[in-house]
Amino acid sequence: MSTNKYVLVTGASSGIGRACAVAFAKEGYNLIITARREERLIALKDELENAYNIIVLYYAFDVRDFEAVKDFASKLESSSIIPYILINNAGLAVSRNKIQEGIIEDWERMIDTNVKGLLYVSRCILPMMIERNAGVVLNIGSTAGHIIYPGGNVYHAAKYAVKALNEAMNLDLVDTDIKVCSIDPGAVETEFSIVRFKGDEENAKKVYEGYEPLKPADIADIAVFVASRPAHVNIQNIIVYPTAQRSVYVHRKN
Protein backbone atom coordinates (compact mmCIF):
# COMPACT_ATOMS: atom_id res chain seq x y z
CA MET A 1 0.00 0.00 0.00
CA SER A 2 1.23 3.50 -0.78
CA THR A 3 -0.07 6.75 0.64
CA ASN A 4 0.77 10.44 0.63
CA LYS A 5 -0.07 10.69 4.32
CA TYR A 6 2.55 11.56 6.92
CA VAL A 7 3.09 9.92 10.30
CA LEU A 8 4.85 12.03 12.94
CA VAL A 9 6.76 10.00 15.54
CA THR A 10 8.46 11.61 18.53
CA GLY A 11 11.29 9.76 20.23
CA ALA A 12 11.94 7.89 16.98
CA SER A 13 15.65 7.24 17.50
CA SER A 14 15.15 3.97 19.40
CA GLY A 15 12.73 1.52 20.96
CA ILE A 16 9.00 1.80 20.34
CA GLY A 17 9.33 5.05 18.39
CA ARG A 18 11.81 3.56 15.95
CA ALA A 19 9.69 0.42 15.59
CA CYS A 20 6.61 2.54 14.83
CA ALA A 21 8.53 4.41 12.14
CA VAL A 22 9.55 1.12 10.54
CA ALA A 23 6.04 -0.36 10.76
CA PHE A 24 4.33 2.63 9.16
CA ALA A 25 7.04 2.87 6.49
CA LYS A 26 6.22 -0.72 5.55
CA GLU A 27 2.59 0.39 5.11
CA GLY A 28 3.69 3.09 2.66
CA TYR A 29 3.30 6.14 4.89
CA ASN A 30 5.70 9.05 4.65
CA LEU A 31 7.37 9.89 7.95
CA ILE A 32 8.33 12.81 10.13
CA ILE A 33 10.74 11.48 12.75
CA THR A 34 11.98 13.48 15.72
CA ALA A 35 14.35 12.85 18.62
CA ARG A 36 17.37 14.43 20.27
CA ARG A 37 19.99 12.17 18.65
CA GLU A 38 20.38 13.53 15.14
CA GLU A 39 22.84 10.88 13.93
CA ARG A 40 20.32 8.13 14.66
CA LEU A 41 17.58 10.01 12.84
CA ILE A 42 19.77 10.41 9.77
CA ALA A 43 20.59 6.70 9.76
CA LEU A 44 16.90 5.78 10.12
CA LYS A 45 15.90 8.19 7.36
CA ASP A 46 18.40 6.64 4.95
CA GLU A 47 17.39 3.11 5.90
CA LEU A 48 13.65 3.64 5.44
CA GLU A 49 13.83 5.76 2.30
CA ASN A 50 16.02 3.15 0.61
CA ALA A 51 13.92 0.21 1.75
CA TYR A 52 10.41 1.53 1.16
CA ASN A 53 10.68 4.39 -1.36
CA ILE A 54 8.96 6.87 0.95
CA ILE A 55 9.71 10.41 2.11
CA VAL A 56 11.30 10.70 5.56
CA LEU A 57 11.77 14.10 7.16
CA TYR A 58 13.79 14.35 10.36
CA TYR A 59 14.03 17.06 13.00
CA ALA A 60 16.40 16.88 15.96
CA PHE A 61 15.10 18.63 19.08
CA ASP A 62 14.01 17.96 22.66
CA VAL A 63 10.24 17.84 23.25
CA ARG A 64 10.87 19.52 26.62
CA ASP A 65 11.82 22.72 24.75
CA PHE A 66 8.57 24.47 23.81
CA GLU A 67 10.30 27.02 21.57
CA ALA A 68 11.95 24.20 19.63
CA VAL A 69 8.61 22.41 19.29
CA LYS A 70 6.93 25.60 18.05
CA ASP A 71 9.70 26.16 15.51
CA PHE A 72 9.37 22.56 14.29
CA ALA A 73 5.59 22.87 13.87
CA SER A 74 6.01 26.20 12.08
CA LYS A 75 8.37 24.57 9.57
CA LEU A 76 5.85 21.84 8.87
CA GLU A 77 3.02 24.33 8.44
CA SER A 78 5.05 26.58 6.14
CA SER A 79 5.75 23.52 3.97
CA SER A 80 2.04 22.57 3.99
CA ILE A 81 2.87 19.26 5.68
CA ILE A 82 0.16 18.16 8.10
CA PRO A 83 0.61 14.85 9.94
CA TYR A 84 -2.26 12.43 9.49
CA ILE A 85 -1.05 10.32 12.41
CA LEU A 86 0.65 11.81 15.48
CA ILE A 87 2.49 9.31 17.68
CA ASN A 88 3.37 10.91 21.02
CA ASN A 89 6.03 8.39 21.97
CA ALA A 90 8.86 10.36 23.59
CA GLY A 91 9.07 9.37 27.25
CA LEU A 92 11.32 7.90 29.91
CA ALA A 93 11.78 6.82 33.51
CA VAL A 94 14.76 7.84 35.62
CA SER A 95 15.77 6.09 38.87
CA ARG A 96 13.65 4.17 41.38
CA ASN A 97 14.22 6.21 44.52
CA LYS A 98 11.58 6.53 47.21
CA ILE A 99 9.88 9.92 47.26
CA GLN A 100 11.69 10.95 50.43
CA GLU A 101 14.98 10.16 48.69
CA GLY A 102 14.00 11.50 45.27
CA ILE A 103 16.34 13.47 43.02
CA ILE A 104 14.58 16.63 41.85
CA GLU A 105 16.35 16.69 38.48
CA ASP A 106 15.09 13.16 37.78
CA TRP A 107 11.54 14.16 38.66
CA GLU A 108 11.67 17.19 36.39
CA ARG A 109 13.10 15.17 33.53
CA MET A 110 10.27 12.63 33.75
CA ILE A 111 7.49 15.19 34.11
CA ASP A 112 8.89 17.49 31.44
CA THR A 113 9.33 14.68 28.90
CA ASN A 114 6.34 12.42 29.55
CA VAL A 115 3.75 15.09 30.32
CA LYS A 116 4.83 18.53 29.16
CA GLY A 117 6.53 17.20 26.04
CA LEU A 118 3.34 15.40 25.00
CA LEU A 119 1.38 18.58 25.68
CA TYR A 120 3.80 20.81 23.77
CA VAL A 121 3.75 18.62 20.65
CA SER A 122 -0.02 18.13 20.80
CA ARG A 123 -0.64 21.86 21.28
CA CYS A 124 1.40 22.71 18.20
CA ILE A 125 0.30 19.88 15.88
CA LEU A 126 -3.38 19.37 16.75
CA PRO A 127 -4.60 22.73 15.34
CA MET A 128 -3.28 21.71 11.91
CA MET A 129 -4.97 18.32 12.15
CA ILE A 130 -8.22 19.92 13.34
CA GLU A 131 -8.23 22.35 10.43
CA ARG A 132 -8.11 19.37 8.06
CA ASN A 133 -10.50 17.41 10.33
CA ALA A 134 -8.81 14.07 9.86
CA GLY A 135 -6.27 11.86 11.55
CA VAL A 136 -5.30 9.73 14.51
CA VAL A 137 -3.40 10.55 17.70
CA LEU A 138 -1.58 7.65 19.36
CA ASN A 139 -0.29 8.38 22.85
CA ILE A 140 2.23 5.80 24.05
CA GLY A 141 1.41 5.41 27.71
CA SER A 142 2.23 2.56 30.07
CA THR A 143 0.66 0.07 32.42
CA ALA A 144 2.43 2.32 34.96
CA GLY A 145 -0.49 4.65 34.29
CA HIS A 146 -2.89 2.04 35.65
CA ILE A 147 -1.20 0.36 38.63
CA ILE A 148 1.67 1.24 40.97
CA TYR A 149 4.82 -0.73 41.73
CA PRO A 150 7.35 0.12 44.47
CA GLY A 151 9.84 2.82 43.53
CA GLY A 152 7.84 4.02 40.54
CA ASN A 153 6.22 7.07 42.19
CA VAL A 154 6.90 10.06 39.88
CA TYR A 155 7.09 7.93 36.74
CA HIS A 156 3.67 6.55 37.64
CA ALA A 157 2.37 10.06 38.23
CA ALA A 158 3.58 11.08 34.78
CA LYS A 159 1.98 8.07 33.07
CA TYR A 160 -1.27 8.51 34.99
CA ALA A 161 -1.20 12.04 33.58
CA VAL A 162 -0.84 10.61 30.07
CA LYS A 163 -3.89 8.43 30.73
CA ALA A 164 -5.85 11.50 31.86
CA LEU A 165 -4.69 13.58 28.90
CA ASN A 166 -5.66 10.81 26.49
CA GLU A 167 -9.18 10.81 27.91
CA ALA A 168 -9.28 14.60 27.84
CA MET A 169 -8.11 14.71 24.21
CA ASN A 170 -10.91 12.38 23.23
CA LEU A 171 -13.43 14.72 24.84
CA ASP A 172 -11.86 17.87 23.41
CA LEU A 173 -11.89 16.39 19.89
CA VAL A 174 -15.39 14.89 20.06
CA ASP A 175 -16.69 17.36 17.47
CA THR A 176 -14.00 16.38 14.97
CA ASP A 177 -13.20 13.25 13.00
CA ILE A 178 -9.82 12.87 14.76
CA LYS A 179 -9.46 9.69 16.82
CA VAL A 180 -7.30 9.31 19.92
CA CYS A 181 -5.88 6.16 21.52
CA SER A 182 -3.44 5.45 24.33
CA ILE A 183 -1.39 2.27 23.87
CA ASP A 184 -0.19 1.20 27.31
CA PRO A 185 2.46 -1.57 27.37
CA GLY A 186 3.91 -3.49 30.27
CA ALA A 187 7.52 -4.65 30.07
CA VAL A 188 9.05 -3.92 26.66
CA GLU A 189 12.74 -4.61 26.10
CA THR A 190 14.20 -1.31 24.90
CA GLU A 191 16.73 1.23 26.17
CA PHE A 192 14.11 2.16 28.80
CA SER A 193 15.83 0.36 31.68
CA ILE A 194 19.29 1.57 30.66
CA VAL A 195 17.99 5.13 30.93
CA ARG A 196 16.18 4.38 34.20
CA PHE A 197 19.37 2.97 35.75
CA LYS A 198 21.47 5.76 34.23
CA GLY A 199 23.62 3.57 32.03
CA ASP A 200 23.96 0.61 34.41
CA GLU A 201 23.57 -2.13 31.80
CA GLU A 202 23.89 -4.97 34.32
CA ASN A 203 20.89 -3.82 36.35
CA ALA A 204 18.97 -2.94 33.21
CA LYS A 205 19.46 -6.44 31.81
CA LYS A 206 18.07 -8.02 35.00
CA VAL A 207 14.69 -6.36 34.36
CA TYR A 208 14.11 -8.68 31.40
CA GLU A 209 15.69 -11.90 32.69
CA GLY A 210 13.71 -15.13 33.18
CA TYR A 211 10.78 -14.34 30.87
CA GLU A 212 10.05 -13.05 27.38
CA PRO A 213 9.21 -9.34 27.44
CA LEU A 214 7.35 -7.51 24.72
CA LYS A 215 9.33 -6.25 21.75
CA PRO A 216 9.06 -2.74 20.27
CA ALA A 217 7.67 -4.29 17.08
CA ASP A 218 4.75 -5.73 19.08
CA ILE A 219 3.67 -2.23 20.07
CA ALA A 220 4.24 -0.92 16.55
CA ASP A 221 1.96 -3.66 15.18
CA ILE A 222 -0.77 -2.50 17.57
CA ALA A 223 -0.24 1.12 16.51
CA VAL A 224 -0.75 0.19 12.84
CA PHE A 225 -3.86 -1.82 13.75
CA VAL A 226 -5.43 1.05 15.72
CA ALA A 227 -4.64 3.62 13.03
CA SER A 228 -6.10 1.44 10.27
CA ARG A 229 -9.58 0.96 11.76
CA PRO A 230 -12.57 2.30 9.81
CA ALA A 231 -13.44 5.96 10.27
CA HIS A 232 -16.33 5.21 12.63
CA VAL A 233 -14.17 3.06 14.99
CA ASN A 234 -12.20 4.81 17.74
CA ILE A 235 -10.20 2.50 20.00
CA GLN A 236 -9.45 4.75 22.97
CA ASN A 237 -7.14 2.57 25.06
CA ILE A 238 -5.22 -0.69 24.75
CA ILE A 239 -3.37 -2.33 27.64
CA VAL A 240 -0.83 -4.97 26.63
CA TYR A 241 1.43 -7.12 28.80
CA PRO A 242 3.86 -9.89 27.91
CA THR A 243 2.25 -13.23 28.67
CA ALA A 244 4.56 -13.75 31.66
CA GLN A 245 3.44 -10.47 33.25
CA ARG A 246 0.08 -9.98 34.91
CA SER A 247 -0.39 -6.62 36.59
CA VAL A 248 2.85 -5.80 38.47
CA TYR A 249 3.69 -9.49 38.82
CA VAL A 250 6.18 -11.15 36.47
CA HIS A 251 6.62 -14.91 36.37
CA ARG A 252 10.33 -15.58 35.88
CA LYS A 253 11.54 -19.05 35.01
CA ASN A 254 14.45 -20.39 37.03
Image (spheres, grey):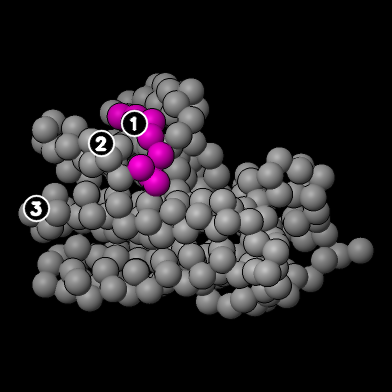
- The verdict on residue 210 being magenta is no
Check if mark 1's residue and mark 2's residue have beta carbons within 8 Å: yes
Discs 3, 2 touching: Cβ within 8 Å: no
Outermost residue, left direction? 131
Q: Looking at the picture, tell me which residue is in the foreground, 217 or 198.
A: 198
Cα gap from disc 3 to disc 2, whole angstroms:
19 Å
Residue 228: in sight, yes or no? Answer: no
Mark 3 or mark 2: name the one nearer the start of the chain. Answer: 2
* Residue 138 seen in this snapshot: yes
Mark sitting earlier along the chain (1/2): 1
Circle 1: residue type? Tyr
Q: Which residue is mark 1?
A: 59
Residue 68 versus residue 133: which sits nearer the camera? Answer: 68
User: For the point 29% across and 65% down, which residue is it?
Assistant: 180
Mark pair 3, 1: CA separation: 23 Å
Dot 2 crowding, Cα within 10 Å, few <14, some 14–19, many 20+: some
Q: Residue 64 in magenta?
A: yes
Q: Which residues are magenta?
A: 57-65
Number of residues whose C-alpha sits closer than 10 Å to that of mark 3, classed few (under 14), some (14–19) or many (20 or more):
some
Q: Quadrant of residue 93?
A: bottom right
Q: Distance from label 1 to label 2 (Cα)?
A: 7 Å
In the rendered structure, the answer to whether residue 9 lies left or right of residue 125 reads: right
Q: Residue 72, which numbered label?
A: 2
Q: Which residue is mark 3?
A: 132
In the shown orientation, is residue 224 left or right of residue 101? left
Q: What percent of the width, then of the height, locates residue 75? A: 19, 32
At a point 24% along the width and 65% down the height, the residue shown is 179
Snapshot quadrant of residue 97: bottom right
